[in-house]
Image: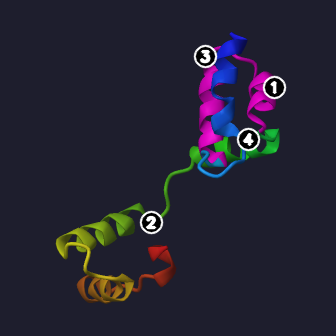
């Protein structure tokens, strides 16, 4: 069982081109589901336990402004990527007549 963990160790190191903490937490969760102990997985990965639990907790929350993000993507795709956030914001405002905060474009 232990040799499986060490094969993935290089991808978890903090070097450039490695996967982010959120993905590390997701993979750690999958490994614990396969029967590995959490402490063993986290020590091998080098992920703090608090970070693991933070990402587990926030992964279960529903996505905020999902409908707005879908509308933004639809407008962007309709105009073949030529619309920036200002034009998309103006079109959303014209279509819905509602106020959409520009920070939802980030």
**What residue is shown with label 3?**
34
The reply to whether discs 1 and 2 touch (Cβ–Cβ < 8 Å) is: no
| Circle 2 residues within 10 Å: few <14, some 14–19, many ≥20 | few
Between residue 19 and residue 21, name the one nearer to us. Answer: 19
When asked about the image quadrant of residue 37, the answer is top right
Task: Pick whichever of labels 4 and 1 is earlier in the sequence.
Answer: 1
Q: Are marks 4 and 3 in contact (CB under 8 Å)?
A: no
Disc 1 versus disc 2: distance between alpha carbons? 35 Å
Q: Helix, strand, or loop for circle 4? A: helix
Q: Is residue 10 above or below residue 67?
A: above
In terms of secondary structure, where does tag 3 sit?
loop
Range drawn in magenta: 21-46
The percent coordinates of residue 30 (x first, y second) are: 59, 26
The residue under the point 59% across, 49% down is 17
Task: Specify which label sits upstream in the sequence, 4 or 2.
Answer: 4
Tell which tag, 3 or 2, sits nearer the viewer.
Answer: 3
Q: Is residue 59 left or right of residue 99?
A: right
Q: Which mark is residue 53?
A: 4
The reply, left or right, for residue 96 in relation to residue 78 is right
The residue closer to the viewer here, 17 or 51, is 17
Q: CA distance from mark 4 to mark 2?
A: 24 Å
Disc 4 versus disc 3: distance between alpha carbons? 18 Å
Which mark, by number, is residue 65?
2
Disc 3 and disc 2: Cα gap in Å?
A: 33 Å
Q: Which residue has dot 1 on it?
A: 39
Label 2 element class:
loop
Residue 2 highlighted magenta (yes or no) = no
Q: CA distance from mark 4 to mark 1?
A: 12 Å
């Amino acid at each position: 069982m232990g040799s499986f963990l060490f094969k993935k160790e290089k991808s978890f190191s903090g070097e450039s081109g490695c996967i982010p903490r959120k993905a590390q937490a997701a993979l750690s969760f999958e490994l614990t589901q396969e029967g590995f102990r959490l402490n063993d997985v986290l020590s091998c990965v080098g992920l703090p336990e608090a970070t693991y639990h933070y990402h587990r907790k926030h992964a279960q929350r529903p996505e905020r402004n999902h409908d707005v993000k879908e509308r933004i993507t639809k407008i962007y795709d309709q105009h073949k990527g030529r619309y920036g956030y200002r034009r998309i914001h103006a079109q959303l405002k014209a279509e819905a007549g509602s106020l959409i905060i520009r920070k939802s474009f980030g």
